[in-house]
Image (cartoon, rainbow, N blue to C red):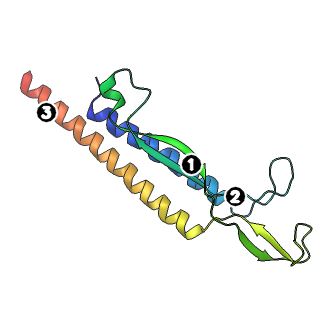
């Protein structure tokens, strides 16, 4: 059975994953080298959500809730910074930096936190309604 508690839980999990992606973006806003030490500026990641839960046991459950369908890379242009003394500068003296705007990331994080909180409130309300329903039965 796929209840409203499961729907709220899937929303909380999705928003937590979204916050993890946003945190990684902020942490890597100045990263221009990859794990092997090669010049490869970090690209902003985006968590794409999709309706449903493909891991649910029932067909009905697969149609409800939400999940992270993909974590993709933002293909917008990288930022250019004038740094002629950098060993990574091009012939014009510019280096490419990650395409991360801290303000955008903070706004996205606030939105994800609010959505997470809304799912918590929905789950708590569901639990209260279930408790009241059981009291009526007993």
Image depth: mark 3 or mark 2 in front: 2
For marks 3 and 2, the one nearer the N-term is: 2
Q: Which mark is residue 12?
A: none
Pointers 3 and 2 in contact (CB under 8 A)? no
Q: Position of residue 39 (x, y in %)?
A: 84, 58
The image shows residue 131, relative to residue 66, as above or below, that is above
Query: Viewed as shown, does residue 78 lie left or right of 137?
Result: right
- Quadrant of res 41: bottom right
State how far apart marks 1 and 3 are (Cα): 36 Å
The image shows residue 17, relative to residue 85, as above or below, that is above
Pointers 1 and 3 in contact (CB under 8 A)? no
Q: Position of residue 99 (x, y in %)?
A: 66, 65
Q: Nearer the viewer, residue 69 or 100?
A: 69
Looking at the figure, which quarter contains the C terminus?
Answer: top left
State how far apart marks 1 and 2 are (Cα): 12 Å
Asked which secondary structure carries label 1, the reply is helix
Asked which secondary structure carries label 2, the reply is loop
The image shows residue 29, relative to residue 72, as above or below, that is below
Q: Position of residue 30 (x, y in %)?
A: 73, 64
Looking at the figure, which quarter contains the N terminus?
Answer: top left
Q: Nearer the viewer, residue 117 or 108?
A: 108
Query: Viewed as shown, does residue 127 lie left or right of 9?
Result: left
Q: Residues within 10 Å of mark 1 (few under 14, many from 20)?
A: few
Asked which secondary structure carries label 3, the reply is helix
Residue carrying label 1? 20
Residue carrying label 3? 132
For marks 1 and 3, the one nearer the N-term is: 1
Q: Which mark is residue 28?
A: 2
């Amino acid at each position: 059975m796929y209840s409203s508690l499961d729907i709220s839980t899937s929303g909380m999990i999705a928003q937590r994953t979204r916050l993890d992606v946003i945190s990684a973006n902020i942490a890597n806003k100045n990263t221009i080298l990859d794990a092997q030490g090669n010049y490869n500026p970090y690209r902003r990641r985006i968590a794409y959500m999709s309706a449903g839960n493909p891991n649910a046991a029932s067909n009905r459950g697969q149609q409800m809730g939400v999940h992270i369908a993909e974590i993709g890379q933002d293909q917008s242009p990288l930022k250019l910074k004038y740094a002629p003394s950098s060993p990574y500068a091009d012939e014009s003296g510019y280096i490419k930096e990650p395409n991360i705007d801290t303000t955008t990331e903070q706004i996205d994080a606030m939105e994800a936190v609010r959505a997470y909180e809304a799912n918590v409130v929905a789950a708590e309300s569901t639990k209260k309604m279930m408790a009241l329903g059981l009291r009526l039965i007993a």
